Image: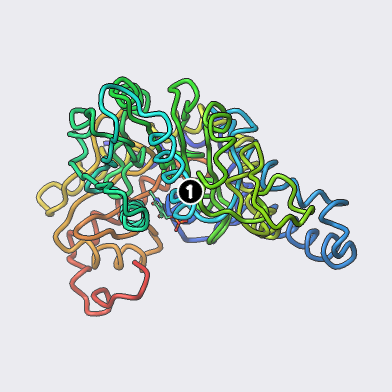
Amino acid sequence: MTARAECVALDAADPLRAHRAAFALPDGVVYLDGNSLGALPRATGARLREVIEREWGVGLIRSWNDARWIELPRRVGAKIARLIGADGHEVVCTDSTSLNLFKVLAAALRLQSLHPRGSTAGRRVILSERGNFPTDLYVAQGLTDLLGAGHELRLVDFDEVADAIDDRTAVVMLTHVNFRTGAMHDLAGITRRAHDAGALAIWDLAHSAGALPVALNAASADFAVGCGYKYLNGGPGAPAFVFAAARHLTSLVHEPFAQPLAGWFGHRTPFAFDAGYAPAPSIDRFAVGTPSILALAALDVGVDTVLAAGVEALRAKSVALARQFVELVEAQCAGLGIELASPRDPDRRGSQVCFRHPHAFAVMQALIARGVIGDFREPDILRFGLAPLYVRHVDVWDAAAAVAEVLAKREWQRTEFQRREAVT
Ligand SMILES: Cc1ncc(COP(=O)(O)O)c(C=O)c1O
């Protein structure tokens, strides 16, 4: 088993070690929840003070032009594009992941009704994974109900998706890295399979963007969405992003309501104040209302922390951290009721490692009380996010030791660790 001193040495030799200093992490905390809420970049406070005090306070409404607030959704979107293998003009930051998914799913279904592909017209199946993040499934259910056009959400298990794609499939809608287990789909392979069958592919990159390289255009992905508050460190409730492949922006240009949340920020000329809607002939059509400038400024800083490190280097470190964490937990917790829930193969896993335990909720509360912050996901998952920008090898060592102690001493049995708050 790796000794703690070896971890200290690995951290000293880590090419990314300087990046941790860019974050304001509290002493005595091992933070393994950056897959849920990224840590606070030190630069965020100063940037927000600047936006609040100078741009808003002094510049007032002039700052929409003078401080280029109006361009911020596209500027931050273009930065995120570099992390997900897209072109800068294909990504915009706006709204939440849930809302953006609604927009792109509607657009994809419209594309299918305009240009039915393959042998069967009238494709009606939205194919997804049973264990997908619930909001994705709810959005699909809500849109299907609203359209009233006979669409059907078909759910299959993680490993069954590729084989379930057939000539009834209109859209394959998946989260690249599963929120519970960290299992990662083959984005390029499934997209190819979807296209071969005449379907379109939508990817939710909530657990990928900023943690590992994604190559949307190399895979010819159709649409994608993702969160700003996880590995992109944009802060709680940060704006999300939306990607539409340039070819679809072109082919939908004469379809004003292909993205049905038609709002004035998606209009071709918002400040013409026309009574009729005409969508922007660009990714801007996925914007809806006035962007939240404070939130976008914070996201801008967060995305910069990722760009400064480089996503390839981040992935290499994340794989090393995960391998070590699995090894340390399994070495110390044999016979203590814990079982790896993530794929062992790093190529099939995102940047989180999960274990099953029958009392996972209470175990996680006991860990948090010790300063090791991960989270719990129903029904029995202990989730540890390994955000490689600021998680060190020594953190992983300390976390594994804490897991072993909590289990061996049955600390999780204490009454205070059974109480559930609204957010787990
Ligand atoms: C995979 C995935 N998609 C979507 C969401 C929700 O996004 P939002 O609440 O920003 O709409 C989450 C939240 O954790 C998620 O994990």
Does 238 sit left or right of 363 as displayed? right
Measured as percent of width and height from the top left, residue 304 is found at 65, 41
Mark 1, residue position: 103
Measured as percent of width and height from the top left, residue 271 is found at 79, 54
User: Residue 48 or 346: which is nearer the viewer?
Assistant: 48
The residue sitting at the left extreme is 335
Q: Residue 110 occupies which quadrant of the picture?
A: top left
Q: Residue at x 59, y 38 (%)?
A: 91
Report the amino acid beneath label 1. Answer: Lys
User: Residue 38 or 100: which is nearer the viewer?
Assistant: 100
Residue 13 seen in the figure: no
In the rendered image of this protein, does residue 298 appear above or below residue 252? below
In the rendered image of this protein, does residue 186 appear above or below residue 296? above
Q: Residue at x 25, y 27 (%)?
A: 120
Q: Which corner quadrant holds the C terminus?
A: bottom left
Q: Residue 39 occupies which quadrant of the picture?
A: bottom right
Measured as percent of width and height from the top left, residue 246 is found at 57, 28
